[in-house]
Amino acid sequence: MRRKAVIAAVMVPLAVAGGVVWALRTQGSAEETAARYLDAWSKSDYAAMRTLVVNPPGDFERWYKGFHDDLKLTSARFTPGAAREGEAGTTVDFRAELRGPVDFGYTGTLRLVERDHGWRVSFSPSAIHGDLKAGTRFKITEVPAESAPITAADGTRVDTPSAPGSVLQLVEGLKAEYGPRLKGKPSARVEIVKGGRPLKTVATGKAVSGSSIRTTIDLRVHQAGAAALEGVSKPASLVALRPSTGEVLAVVNRPGGFNRALLGKYPPGSTFKVVTASALVAGGVAPDDTVECPPEQTIGGFAFHNAEFHDYGRLSFRDAFAHSCNTTFGSMSVDDLGGSRLAEVARSFGFGAPITPGVPAVRAEFPDPHDDTDLASAAIGQGRVLASPLNMATVAAAIADGTWRQPRLVPPSLVPAGGAAPRRLEPAVVSALRKLMPAVVSEGTASAVAFPPGTAGKTGTAEFGSGDEPPTHSWFIGYQGDLAFAVIVEGGGTGAAVAAPIASRFLAGLSR
């Protein structure tokens, strides 16, 4: 017979020999007590639960906390049913819905007794779960899911020990960035154990397979880059991109250990003249305009000079670019541009923007010049201007395609948020630079190097350190068709003598 809840104690008469005795009737209902108990359990409020238990044992809280911790619960909900009268006395069934490594539910039972004119829960381990007894506990056994593969663009796995070392550097970065996606969800089972020995499997969770990542790496392009760096004795790297999409095709570092291609920050030297020339062309300078290129020129109190103090006199802007005239670009940046304009154009080539290819990569830096000397230095890629080979490869790619694009190593859907949007260059700038950059190869600083037809580029010799003749990084950036690239050799010397031949070997290797 179901008991009814009452608002307050009621005096009821009991007939006994010799008269009438008045007694207090039990307050509330078994269902109300069970509901309060289960609500407190859902909130892990074990202290509140204890107040609703008759003669709670000393390890009462430990039982419930152990239940929560053993199942690694992230949430739990307990919903009461109706009270029932039976051989076990008054009971209330409840439904448990649990979330954790294994999501599962079960039906449990609370036994309630009348004590001190109210209802109380009679606790035993079975109040938590019907199969739980003294000396037993829950245990989750996880079986890790097999990690999904990381592949090159053609589907070849590159997350194996046999993959090239530079590719494995990228793989490690991808695992750090997309670990949960690759690993999926392990299979698991919930068991009741005693002394570590399984007694019963209560629930099982199915494994969810990880999702593979197909990178943009083209192993043929990567192998050509690696072959081009064979025999280079100083730290070097090569990056190749597809200008039309921003896809990273190759990232080669020699030696391994540090991914200088994506994380190295270097003065870009004269490769930055691609940016400066773009700013000048946008301001009205034409490739055939006549400019001055003296061997040395003082700008803002500092003497700038050309390589080996070469005096080119009066020549076309195209030839000044091809021969990498420092004095021309330093003075024109001050006379015709100004720091804010050059900074604005640098931003259109990705300087200052977060670079989010799918693995860690540094952004290119172009601090606002604070005087004429600083501006002239920045215009030739010195001073405080810094960039990685990846950054400079995107500069060459922007001229090849007409749009600066964020480089990416993963499918577009996986590219991390926060990267810069594509930026279309002015058509006149693209047209002019497509005349200037080929001239570097045909008759300029890289003319002594045998490049395949259709190659355009820019050499760079970037000073670092100190002294009258500081050491230099050797740079070459360029493009050929829908392929853009950047090469750097740390402390390698001039761009024409070291980096340009590496770029030539790289392109030649692709044609085999």
Image (spheres, grey):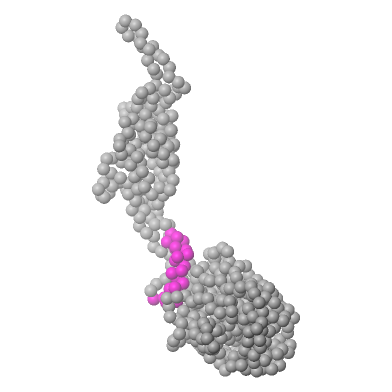
**In this view of the protein, can residue 374 be seen by the observer?**
yes
> x and y percent of residue 199 in the render?
27, 46
Q: Residue at x 47, y 75 (%)?
A: 259
Residue stretch in magenta: 162-184
Looking at this view, is 6 or 110 the one in front? 6
Q: Is residue 108 above or below residue 372?
A: above
Q: Is residue 349 above or below residue 178?
A: below
Q: What residue sits 57% from the left and 73% below the top?
A: 364
Percent of width and height locating residue 45: 41, 39
Q: Position of residue 71 (x, y in %)?
A: 37, 48
User: Toward the viewer: 12 or 86?
Assistant: 12
The answer to whether residue 476 is above or below residue 264 is below
| Quarter of image, res 417 | bottom right
As for residue 176 lying within the magenta part, the answer is yes
Q: Residue at x 50, y 69 (%)?
A: 360
For residue 482, what is the image quadrant? bottom right
Q: Residue 373's quadrant in the figure? A: bottom right
Please, which residue is most extreme toward the front here?
301
Q: Is residue 272 visible?
A: no
Q: Nearer the viewer, residue 200 or 417?
A: 417
Q: Residue at x 63, y 87 (%)?
A: 303
Q: Quadrant of the N terminus?
A: top left
Taking the magenta stretch, the answer to whether it contains residue 228 is no
Q: Is residue 32 left or right of residue 437?
A: left
Q: Residue furthest top?
A: 18
| Label tally | 0
Is residue 101 shown left or right of residue 301? left
Q: Give the percent coordinates (x, y) of residue 120.
A: 37, 29
Q: Main secondary structure of the magenta part?
A: helix
